Amino acid sequence: MLQHPPTKQRDGIQWRIDEILGRVDDAKTKQAYYYQQSISEIDGAWVMTEDGRKLMFATYSYLGLLRHPYIDQAAKDAIERYGTGTHGVRLLGGTLDIHLDLEQTIARFHGRDDAIVFSSGYVTNLATISTIVGKGDWVISDKWNHASIVDGCSLARGHFVRFRHNDMKDLERRLQQAPEGAGKLVVADAVFSMDGDIFPLPEALELCHKYNARLMIDEAHSLGVLGDTGHGIEEYFGMPGSIDIKMGTLSKTIPGVGGYIAADEEMITFLKHAARAFIFSAALPPAVVAACKAGFEVIEREGVERNRILSRNVKHFIGGLQERGFDTGVSVTPIVPIMTYSDDKALMMTKYCQENGVFVLPVLPPAVPPGKSRLRANVTAAHTIEDIDFALDVFEAAGKFAGVI
């Protein structure tokens, strides 16, 4: 165990520890620390916590598939057939037939040749980008991309640059800077996880074709959300099959855990034999795999109606917040920032909401830039209009209490 150096001067390790502990202590002092809150029951859009029953607005279950009976039963059946684990890593003895079934289901869902499943969404981006991008290559990332993309770019041996958020002129500038003949990978979220806006796929794709760059899109927050049937950003823009590398998670709209890449057969075969996080990580448990496969089946069967309800709820929620005087930024999706700008006001609003039956959490620096603190409220298809109206009243009272509106 590392010991604190026996000197008055802190080293870099201790400085970073103290900084985080200071933030945690500050929130606890204000009685506004609600991270890692224990949930004991889930009932649709409502959850039971130690402090009582609350309406959940901090979930990624955009289509409300948590506790779906068909998905739950698939997981139970898988345990009955296979048990709780596998024989190890996928490349050796850990591949079950349902792993291959899941990957083929994902490939069909996205209209691709094949897919590869990783142990988490974070690992998927980390492994894929760092495996694809080698010495002499360029990886070009939107400035607001998720941390997993940033970390994958940093781990890659190529040259890592960013372009201004959703700024296609700046993306072109970066593409022009890359040496002729260099491999180029452009990476972006489809829906950005802090602001809820959408990546301009048509313009980006045109630039990638112009400069011979591959395009990788992270569909973590767009699966089940974008497109009339919830098939994602390609459906939303009417551009099927246009993205080279499609990444997605199995822990948001799909109620499981894991991440995946859907692409052509050549890319998937390469990743299965070169991505260290796939080669050296244990295979996903059978119950999770079966639940994820069932999740895609439910979207294919119920996606149109659930997406219609979700779209209705998003409009009602964002419109209601704006009518009450809140700044919701540029969001047009279920991810809705309620801007407070001040850290203290974000904590005050959170405390009020949590004490009055709404489960919502603050987002503070460094997750967002200084001065851009907010509550991030996620609306889902599981919410009723009555649920949303209840939450709007609580948010309004909290905003007035904290001096936000």
Image (spheres, helix red, strand yellow):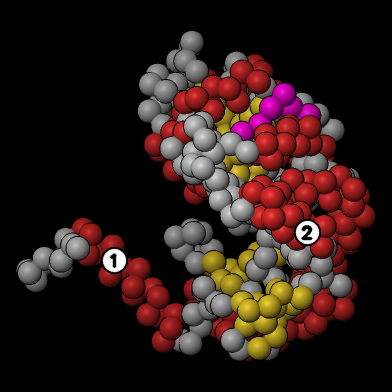
Inspect the image, locate mark 1, and give the three-letter code of the amino acid beneath it: Ile
Q: Is residue 216 visible?
A: yes
Q: Residue 165 in the image: x percent, y percent?
A: 58, 43
What residue appears at the point 39 percent right and 80 percent down from the top-left corner? 26
Q: Can residue 161 be found in the magenta stretch?
A: no
What residue appears at the point 48 percent right and 10 percent down from the top-left corner? 181
Quadrant of the rendered structure where residue 385 is?
bottom right
Q: Which residues are magenta?
A: 110-116
Q: Residue 381 in the image: x percent, y percent?
A: 82, 63
Q: Is residue 20 above or below residue 234?
A: below
Quadrant of the rendered structure where residue 18 is?
bottom left
Q: Residue 368 in the image: x percent, y percent?
A: 51, 59
Image quadrant occupied by the C terminus: bottom right
Tell me the SS state at disc 2. Answer: helix
User: In this view of the protein, which residue sits in the foreground, 142 or 18?
Assistant: 18
Give the residue number, with chain letter if any, for mark 2: 73
Q: Is residue 211 above or below residue 324?
A: above
Inspect the image, locate mark 2, and give the three-letter code of the amino acid beneath it: Gln
For the view shown, which residue lies furthest in the left direction?
Answer: 7
Give the residue number, with chain letter if any, for mark 1: 17
Which mark is on residue 362?
none
